[in-house]
Amino acid sequence: MQISNTEITVMAKKCSGCAYCYLICPSNAINMYYNKIIIEKSLCTMCKKCLYVCPKDAIKISSFVLFNNKDYEVQE
């Protein structure tokens, strides 16, 4: 069986804490915690506005496929 999942992820080491993503998120899915972002995945609508506004490329889209009970990241 194969199930795919796509989500927004943050590369914490790249994040500068500028808050551009926090300010632009229309669904309030992004919170700031000690100048780093946390994405509430249940609120995220995948509009990708945060991805485009991030000056450090700290936000990426990850696609995962569940195959035979193992999670594999899809490289794009």
Image: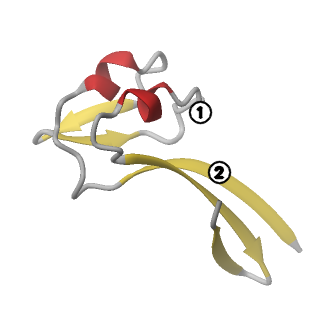
Out of 11 and 31, give the one closest to the viewer.
11
Q: Secondary structure at mark 1?
A: loop
- Tell me where residue 6 appears, x and y as whole percent: 65, 51
Say few, some or many: other residues with alpha carbon within 10 Å of mark 1 (under 14 / 14 to 19 / 20 or more).
some
Q: Against 43, is 38 above or below?
A: below
Out of 23 and 53, give the one closest to the viewer.
53
Question: Callout 2, which amino acid?
Answer: Thr
Q: Which numbered disc, 1 or 2, marks the residue that appears first in the sequence?
A: 2
Say few, some or many: other residues with alpha carbon within 10 Å of mark 2 (under 14 / 14 to 19 / 20 or more).
few
Residue lying at 48% horizontally and 25% vertically, measured from the top left: 49
- Tell me where residue 69 appears, x and y as whole percent: 73, 81
Q: Against 66, is 32 above or below?
A: above
Query: Which residue is disc 2 drawn over?
Result: 6
Q: Quadrant of residue 54?
A: top left
Q: Against 48, is 71 above or below?
A: below
Question: Callout 1, which amino acid?
Answer: Met
Out of 11 and 33, give the one closest to the viewer.
11
Q: Is residue 25 left or right of residue 34?
A: right
- Tell me where residue 76 appears, x and y as whole percent: 65, 59
Callout 1–callout 2 Cβ contact below 8 Å: yes
User: Which label sits on residue 46?
Assistant: 1
Q: Quadrant of residue 37?
A: top left
Q: Secondary structure at mark 2?
A: strand
Q: Quadrant of residue 51?
A: top left
Image quadrant for the N terminus?
bottom right
